[in-house]
Amino acid sequence: MHTDTGEIGYGEAPPTGAITGDTTGAIIGAITDHIRKALVGRDIDDFEDLTTALDGAVVKNSSAKAAVDMALWDLYGQKYQIPVYKLLGGARKKIITDITISVNSPEEMARDAVNAIKRGYDTLKVKVGVDPTLDVARLKAIRDAVGSAPRIRIDANQAWAPKEAVRLLNEMQESGLAIELVEQPVKAHDLEGLTYVTERSYVPVLADESVFSAEDALKIVEMRAADLINIKLMKCGGLTSALKIAALAEISGMECMIGCMLEAKVSVNAAVHLACAKKVITRVDLDGPVLCSEDPIDGGAVFNEKEITVSDAPGLGIKGIRGLTYLDV
Ligand SMILES: [Mg+2]
């Protein structure tokens, strides 16, 4: 986002059709056909009006909104020469992320887990749910290989039926796997099922796909349908909406995780600013940038394996993107 005073605000929206429904064409269309009209020509100092206009420019399209919302925060911080994480609370400068272990054979997953621990990670996020009969065996192989010290959290990606989830989770805990939390054990829309699992499982439940917007978070809080909420900028539509979810969680005594899609450093950097600003975000799942094979982005947070350090440059601190091209739209 360019201003007539020469600043550039950076945003990013990966097309994650399988989760948000947002595709490349839809993201570009939402920005060029709807959002642009609502924002171009206005003053960055009308910040509240700008974020309201952005949210109202088009329904859904949370990824496009997230990209533009973070560009607005970037420009606002640049104007007042303050890094966004300080503007939002400034709780800390450094956060520690987990790393994802993908679904494979138990032996391969145990090997990947050992490699991650050797690289310094102390928290593993293990994908489960592809084949429920093998899940406990996979986790046992990992726990045996890494010992008792590393934290293991699991992500079922909506795979289980509520009763199946309770049975599997309690079996895991009873066999000493010490699972820290389970992400989204049941279907996103099945809040009754999620509540059922939360009430009966020894393993704390984190709502991911069940919470896109702040309105969704309110429902989860009211129903006590989960123990924790996973905030992702691409689900909620940016920092403005994420702040509302964080506040809701804080008020209701819940903690949050901050996560990402397969994202590069621009948008994950915005998530880092939020996580460094807010103490209610106690868990970090921002391993997107370390999974990227190249990094054309200058500035922003420094990603050094598990350790992420926020930038103290004004705004979001992105200085430029090498090889960036502009669409003629
Ligand atoms: Mg998840």
Image: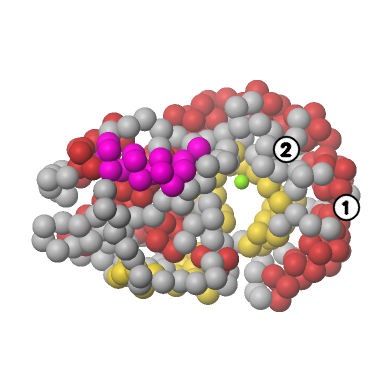
Amino acid, disc 1: Ala
For residue 90, side relative to residue 205 (left or right):
left
Q: Is residue 323 above or below residue 204?
A: below
Q: Residue placed at 57% from the left, 25% from the top? A: 223
Q: Position of residue 111 (x, y in %)?
A: 80, 69
Residue 247 in view: no
Q: Which residues are magenta?
A: 21-35
Q: Residue at x 41, y 33 (%)?
A: 60
Q: Residue at x 72, y 32 (%)?
A: 197
Determine whether label 2 and label 1 are within 8 Å by CB.
no
Label 2 crowd (10 A; few <14 / some 14-19 / many >=20): some
70, 12: nearer the viewer: 12
Under mark 2, the amino acid is: Ala
The crowd level at tag 1 (other Cα within 10 Å; few <14, some 14-19, many 20+) is: some
Looking at the image, is 246 positioned above or below residue 163?
A: below
Name the residue tied to disc 2.
Answer: 159
Secondary structure of the residue carrying numbered label 2: loop
Q: CA distance from mark 2 to mark 1?
A: 17 Å
Instruction: Give the mark, 2 or 1, whose residue is nearer the N terminus.
Output: 1
Query: Which residue has dot 1 on it?
Result: 137
x and y, in percent, of residue 245 in the image? 44, 39
Would residue 271 be seen by someone viewing this image from the given angle? yes
Q: Quadrant of the N terminus?
A: bottom left
Q: Which mark is residue 264?
A: none
Secondary structure of the magenta portion, mostly? Answer: helix
In the image, residue 32 lies in the stretch drawn in magenta: yes
